[in-house]
Amino acid sequence: MLFADRIETLLSLSLHDLLEPKVRRAIEEALDRGETHYTDRPGILPLRQAVAASLRRRFALDVTDVIITCGVTEARFIAIQQVLQPGETICAPAYAERINGAAVLRRVQVTQGAGNALYLNSSMGESSLRDFPGWILYEVDEEQSGFHPAQLAGREKRTFTLGSIGAPSLRVGYLAAPASFSPGLRDFKQALTICTTNLSQWAALAGMETE
Amino acid sequence: MKTLAEIQGLDGTLLRNALMDLAKDMPDAITLGRGDPDLATPAFIVEAAKRALAGPLPLTPVAGLPELRAAIAANAPRDHGITADAENVLITTGGQEALFLVMNALLNPGDEILVPDPRYSSYDQAIEHTGAVSVRVPTNAQDNFDLDPAEVEARITPRTKALLLVSPSNPTGGILTPERAASLAELARQHDFAVISDEIYGKFVWEPFRHSSMAALPGMLDRVIVISGFSKAYAMTGWRVGYILAARDAIKALAAVKAHTTGPAATLSQHAALAAALSDDSCVAEFRNIYAERRDLLAAGLTAMGLTYGEPRGGFFFWADSSGTGMRALELCYLVLMHAQVLIFPGTAFGEAWSNYLRITTLQPTPMLAEAVERMMPVMKPLLAAGSASTRPVADR
């Protein structure tokens, strides 16, 4: 009985909720450096560079402009608001629930057939791409696939890549876009949240460095 | 580095960002532009974050950490003059997201929202996203940029859905007086529109003035949506924690929108904000003294240059009339940045009509502010002296 409360607490802990020691240390160091102010709107440079390097390594992508977002949720939201116009459609062969809300707020319809844009996930594989002619929002949601739509001729300037980094509670994601979209995406990010949580960005960077 | 020609076509947020980018390339620049408190987050908040790090940090519900929502509700009488419970609170990813959520939950295409001018330009982007129309309500120097209910009333139409207020004001430093707040509340009731009350600078109001929320007026609680946060009050801009206080149904609707914009705020940041919310606010009192000293220093400096400005009754900003220089504010800001390495913002970053105004912040340590004044003096003073000579009647020359 003496330890009942403690045992109950321990049993309720999820390993997933505990940050890696390296990540915790990075946050403490960032706190000691005073990293408690706004960062640049697109995010801290070393994290943006780390994401670009990771996409280069995994998909052979030549990514020059990465925006750090508040989780992949914000990356999806920004992409949909900036890529699509009200009244347009986006095709989501699967995981439509991930983008339904963002689509409603843009007054965009989510379909299973044709669309002005296609929302794909890396876990769905190459076959889902078909011969889609419009914008592609490609979410990297698993660790294995080496396929990326931008590897196909003519698709690199039409593909947006998004994903999450680190523990979910850090709320860090990324959005890599064709260069012509970058100014609009940055401005929209500024209008929505100004920047992503400073400490979370350093934590996410430390997590990537442990890969 | 962008040239003057390249930034001349910009306004609003784009102009602010372009000027900040220019200053970033200058190692000795003193930035009196962005509203980012230079002060460190208080140590007890940092320590609370470190303690939270040792334990599990699961995702919170979208509406926020329950303890934080409850603490903000408990502080609502002190901070906003209203009573609330946790279900009246939504935690957001900074005050900026709060603003975006409210606009998107409230406004439909074709609706009209009344917005004081000059204004924080991010309001424009949030409104534009909804397809609603921003109807500008002019304010003027003679009235210390206080919002005039008669000017508001003249712009009300059957499509008016809301009135946006920010008190203390960014960029003018003005505050909403109780008399005018009561008149505006009467208009809101009479014409059945909502009031969005941005109170992010509410903890920094200078004597003899007092912060008061429209929500505290009789019959207004269900009509007013309050936006605030921890960024300015506790020097926590980088943690990204804001909040909305509103009726329960409104909070449910706003949380439904938030689930699709960013999801819950970062868990660690919410624990840090909880420490701030549970504190006795003595750190805010200390900050207030520091900012008051800086305000006095900058006021003396700007006056010595020959600039006139609205009385800064709250917040971090001076809104100064630069028409006496004979230059448009944008060119003047560029000149000040290039020759004095001091970043200030032109009025056009806060509304197209304000090409003869400057926004200058107090958000640098006192010695830096003193140096900024010293550097600006040789640039501004001759311009203002020449401008005033050229506009003087001939007999006086």
Image (cartoon, rainbow, N blue to C red):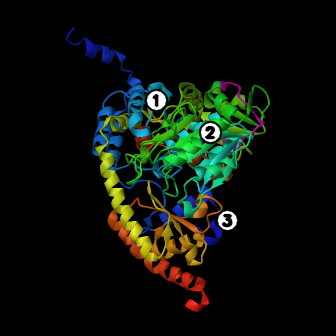
Residue drawn at x 44%, y 54% as measured from the top left: B314
Q: Is residue B227 above or below residue B378?
A: above
Could you tell me which secondary element the residue under label 3 belongs to?
A: loop
Q: Is residue A151 above or below residue B83?
A: below
- Residue at the spot 66% in from the left edge and 28% down from the top edge: A100
| Quadrant assignment for the C terminus of chain B | bottom right
Residue at 63%, 60% in the rendered image: B11
Q: Quadrant of residue B29?
A: bottom left
Residue A118 image offset from top left, x and y in percent: 72, 34
Disc 1 versus disc 2: distance between alpha carbons? 30 Å
Region rendered in magenta: A81-96
Q: Mark 3: give few (<14), some (14-19) or many (20+) Cα within 10 Å.
A: few
- Tag 2 subunit: B
Q: Earlier in the sequence, mark 1 or mark 2?
A: 1
Report the Cα–Cα distance between label 1 and label 3. 41 Å
What residue type is disc 3 on? Gly
Q: Nearer the viewer, residue A121 or B362?
A: B362
Disc 2, SS = helix
Q: CA distance from mark 3 to mark 2?
A: 37 Å
Q: Chain of mark 3?
A: B
Q: Is residue A162 visible?
A: no
**Residue corresponding to mark 1:** B64
Q: Give the chain letter at badge 1.
A: B
Residue that carries the numbered disc 2 in the rendered image: B188
Disc number at residue B366? none
Disc with the residue nearer the chain's start (1 vs 3): 3
Residue beneath the point at 48% across and 25% down: B87
- Is B43 on the left or on the right of B187, as rendered? left
Mark number, residue B9:
3
